Every structure is written in structure tokens, then in C-alpha cells.
Image: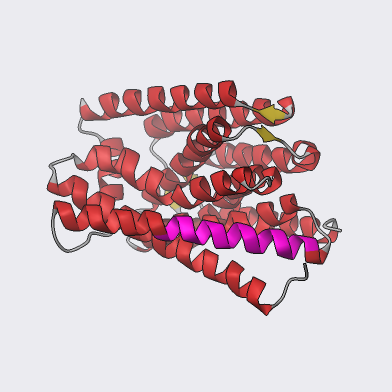
Amino acid sequence: MDATLTTYLMLAGGLVLLTIGGDTLVRGASTAAKSMGVSPLLIGLTLVGFGTSTPELVTSITAAMAGSPGIAVGNIVGSNTANILLILGVAALITPILVDRAAFRRDGWMLVIASAVCAGAVLAGRIGFIWGLGMIALLIAYLVVAYLGERSVEDAERAKYEHISEDAPDARGGLWAGLGLAVVGIALTIGGARLLVDGAVVIARDLGVSDTVIGLTVVAVGTSLPELVTSVVAAARKHADVALGNVVGSNIYNVLGILGITAMVSPLDVPPEIARVDLWVMLGATALLVLFVRTGMKIVRWEAGVLLLAYGGYIAWLATNAA
């Protein structure tokens, strides 16, 4: 089947629906949670992070069930790479990011652990139910420890997660309005994922490239748009630490939550090219983030430029080796 204008419109429409759906879900869930008296800390730790990762979740599950593991795994690996090199690069270019040492010690280690788990799963070649179950268990343990730890003290890290909650858009109305919006957001996200995956598969075949390349680029960046919006808004409001927390949290969710749930729903055979190159790019981006943070506990504009140049180089390499 040749990719036609209709196919490209499907792809664009899927990206739009994913972006609107993710924002609507966060807006509705945050409003409902606040109306029920849920603490801003818990909202920041869970609803916002998981809500902005919903496009990756739905897209990866949809791709896996459609028999396109390249899109499913490439979406997660590519999103984590884009989150660090592209999104954090843009955010730090707007406002240099000061890092709380104690906060990054905990979340940074979990990011490293999640990245190592992802590497083990990808190199294993097949990510099945047991891998997925272990990832979900690790994510739950992390959230419990984080919530209990931050609830017990009034410090900058607790304030950061509460800022995340404050930066999440609210909807007018109370519990039922919020729940209604959340349902609409889920429906839009599912519809957008279906259009995106179907369009991406057809375009990949028409261009003679693998599903994996499309998953690593168009799908990965498209599903990362909610993180981009959240991080840019946070940086513009001088909550640059929230932008860093959003990226780190999203990358943890992507591996432990999205890859974990997807593997439990439909086991994934990892395309060899991801294990050869793209996994190592993601791990290199993670190492670069940790290096920049550890040297001065901040990410300044020249470092943001390095992140953006690295992402541009990676995309250029993918483009030249796509055939």
C-alpha cells in the first residue's frame, strides 16, 4: 500500500489527538484528584508524570498488539532519548536548571536503574510477562518510597512535586467534570494512537524504512509532545527544576511503567537494530545528563546546546542509515 496524502493526514491527526488527549487526561485527572483532597505531592508524583506518558503507553500497546514491536520498543527508547536531548535541551536553553542534590541523588539513581533494566530487557531480545511484572513492581516500590519520604519532610524536593501539581492545567468544575474530562482524554489518546500507528506503518513501508526507524523518530517525538509542553511551561515560569523532574520522572515511567505494561499485555521481540545502536544512544544520553548534573549541580545554556546538537546528530544518522 502506498502512502498517500490521506496516510500523512492520519499520522498528523494521530499526533494532534495524542497531544490533546494527553493534556485533557492530565487536566481532568488533576482536577478530580484535587476535588477529592488528594495532596499536591501525590498528584505531582503520580498523575502528572503518568498522564504525560499516556501517549507512549497507548501507542506502544497499540503497536505491540498490531504486530509492530519496532514501533512499540522504538517509541520508548526514542522517547527517552528525545526527553533528555531535545526536551531538556530546550527547557535548559530557556532557563538554566539548578538541581537539588538530595533530590537528584534519589531520582537520578532510579533513572540509572530503570535505564539498566531497559538495557537488560532489550539485550535479552524478548521482553515478556516476567520482565514486565518486575518493571511494574520496581515502579510501585519507587513511588511508595518517594511519597513516604517526601511526605515526611518540608523541603525543596517536596515543593518541586507540588509545583508540578500547580503547573498541571485545571478544568472548571469538580469531581465529575474532572472524571469526564479524563475519560475524554483517554478516548482521544486511544484514537490518536490508532491513527498514528496505522499511518506510521504505511509510511515506513512506502519509504522503504523499518517500523523501528519510524518508532524512534516520528512516533517517539510525537508521543513526547506532552512532556515538551509541560517542561517548556515549567521553564517559562522559572520552575526549571520541575522541567528536570518531569523528564527524569517520564523516563522512569516510560521504562518501568509503559514498557512493563506493554510487555505484560503483549510480549515484545526486540528488533536487532535497537540493541545495536539506539539503546546505546539512550544510555549515552542518560550518562550525559548525569555528568552535566554532577558537574556543578546545574544545567546551563551551553550544556543545553550540547544536548540539542547531540540529538540533531542522532536524527541525522538515523536519516542517512534509514534505507
Give coordinates of residue 130: x percent, y percent: 57, 20
Q: Which residues are magenta?
A: 188-205
The residue at the far bottom in this view is 5
Tell which of 319 and 129 is nearer to you.
Answer: 129
Picture quadrant where residue 271 is located: top right
Res. 234 visible in picture = no
Tell which of 207 and 252 is nearer to you.
Answer: 207
Residue pictured at 74% horizontal, 29% vertical = 125
Tell which of 39 and 128 is nearer to you.
Answer: 128
Where is 138 relative to 248, above or below?
above
Give coordinates of residue 14: x percent, y percent: 53, 65
Res. 227 visible in picture = yes
Where is 69 relative to 127, above or below?
below
Q: Is residue 106 magenta?
A: no
Residue pictured at 13% horizontal, 43% vertical = 36
Q: Quadrant of the C terminus?
A: bottom right
Residue pictured at 62% horizontal, 53% vertical = 307
Magenta stretch, main secondary structure class: helix
